[in-house]
Amino acid sequence: MRWVWLDTENSNFYYKITELNKRQLSHTISIVTGHKVDQVLDYLNEIESDIELRTYLEQAIKISRYNKDIKVDYGRRIGWYAFVRIMKPEVVVETGVDHGVGACIITSALMRNAQEGFLGKYYGTDIRPEAGQLFRGKYSTYGSIIYGDSIQSLTEFRNKIDIFINDSDHNFEYEYTEYLTIKDKLSKGGIILGDNSHDSSSLLRFSEENNRSYLFFSEKPFSHWYPGGGIGISF
């Protein structure tokens, strides 16, 4: 009820995850990537303590069409960040950009990777031409948004994909069709992160049919009414 009166969010929900949940996430990522838990935790803390990104998002929200009272926290997206920092991908694709917070988090990781000598690029897809208003400035120099139907955009996509993040239409068949579309576009060792796997079995089904391992991380928000989503991981 407190949130109803504040009315700060109306599409994506923004919150931190609990400290225990963060540790659980670090172990999950460690299993998938083979990196030590402490190193994963360092990356999770790195994005949460990025003052430059947080300041940028606060200022970008003020000049956007979005509710000016939105207070951005990253939730399970910090897991996306850690995967990008660890895997040092050349290409990351996210379907469903919405505000563009995820895009900024991913390109923030790509930025740091570039400073370490690993170049990578972000591609977002969204059917709505107004999507991605927060994806501006130096963050947009590390990627771009392709507007139009995601499946059509993925069909025409020519690069090998190292990390694919599904966060677009949450219809089971549409999500599953995205996975089928990028199946042969994944690089060797490429992974898929499903943002709707707490409510959909499409990534699990795809993984089983294609002899891929699958894990699910269940998100636990800190001090927020929303019970949390999760990350499906196909690798």
Image: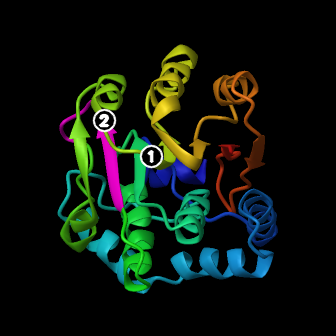
- Amino acid type at image mark 1: Ile
* Residue drawn 52% across the image and 24% down it: 175
In this orientation, does residue 202 appear?
yes
Pointer 2 with pointer 1, Cβ within 8 A? yes
Tag 2's secondary structure? loop
Tag 1's secondary structure? strand
User: Which residue lies under the disc numbered 1?
Assistant: 161
Q: Position of residue 66 (x, y in %)?
A: 27, 52
Tell me if residue 129 is in the magenta stretch: yes
Quadrant of the frame with the C terminus: top right
User: Which residue lies under the disc numbered 2?
Assistant: 157
Answer with the quarter of the image where residue 210 lies.
Answer: top right
Image position of 50 (left or right of 57): right
In front of the other: 135 or 57: 135
Image position of 156 (left or right of 85): left
Judged from this view, the residue extending furthest toward the top is 173
- Per the rendered image, the range of residues in magenta is 121-130
* Residue drawn 36% across the image and 83% down it: 52
Image position of 57 (left or right of 209): left
In front of the other: 183 or 172: 183
- Amino acid type at image mark 2: Phe
The span from disc 2 to disc 1 (Cα, nearest Å) is 9 Å
* Residue drawn 24% across the image and 33% down it: 128
The colour mode here is: rainbow
* Residue drawn 45% across the image and 64% down it: 72
Q: Position of residue 38 (x, y in %)?
A: 76, 81
- Which mark is on residue 181? none
Majority secondary structure of the magenta segment? strand
Tell me if residue 217 is in the magenta stretch: no
Answer with the quarter of the image where residue 110 lies.
Answer: bottom left
